Image (spheres, helix red, strand yellow):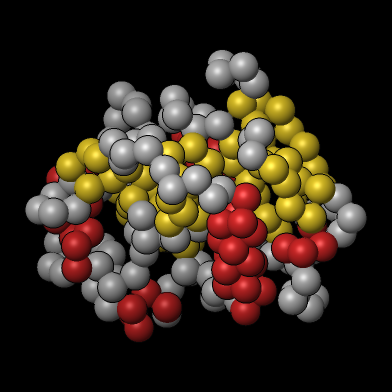
Amino acid sequence: MEATLPLPTTLTARLDQAEELRVPASWEEFLAILPDCPYRIEYDQGQIRSFMGYATENHETLVAAIIQLLGQIFQDKEIRISGSNLALHVPDSGKNYFNADCAVIQGSSEKIPLIGSMYAVANPLLLVEVLAKSTINFDLGQKFKAYCKIPSLQQVLFIDSEEITVISQTRINGGSDWLLQEYRDTTGEVAVLDQGSFRVGDLYEKIRF
């Protein structure tokens, strides 16, 4: 990618900088570097954001585990489960670009063009974020506030990779209110919309703290 912004142009250079990096940029500047950027970047409130905390084994194991558990719950062929490379569109007065660790989509994807053949999906049903030290404040705060603006979204699951904790935020009656539930015991059953549930112990079965 071209060095037109004070943004590292290689993964090695990015790893030499702080875990969280924010660079003011226009939406057009972001799109110009997005296809060739060698590390994940997001865009919100006129800034390119990059979080480069080390992806721990626990983090990646939990991502794989929740995808498997959700796959057991959502067996309808009209429902698809995607990983973290899927771009998400948040309707807003400004431009934005987000990724979640896991996204559940029902029916046809509503695609918002980005650049070239790249697009963002605007109609997820459920999103999952596995929390890490470098992203926990952003994920639980500003990112969740942005997710709340997605009309199709009915639930967000936050899974802690540092301790046994699952936080569920579920939209109430299709409105702007959300029901917060926390699960900190392995015997807890986390409800997934009206489709079923999974046991916290099954999610953390292979995790060693």
Query: Residue at (79%, 55%) from the top-left corner?
Result: 199
Rendering quarter of residue 200:
bottom right
Left or right: 59 in relation to 100: right
Give coordinates of residue 198: x percent, y percent. 74, 52
Q: Report x, y in % for residue 171.
A: 61, 26
Q: Quadrant of residue 163?
A: bottom right
Up the image or down, 93 lies above or below 126; here it is above
The quadrant of the picture occupied by the C terminus is bottom right
Viewer-proximal residue among 155 and 68? 68
Nearest to the observer: residue 157 or residue 202: 202
For this rendering, which residue is in front, 188 or 6?
188
Residue 162: give x, y in percent of width and height.
Answer: 74, 66
Res. 45 in view = no
Residue pushed farthest left?
Answer: 116
Instruction: State the residue in front, 86 or 187.
Output: 187
Name the residue rendered at 62%, 79% in the picture: 57
Please name the residue shown 28% across and 73% down the image.
Answer: 38
Residue at image coords 35%, 83%: 12
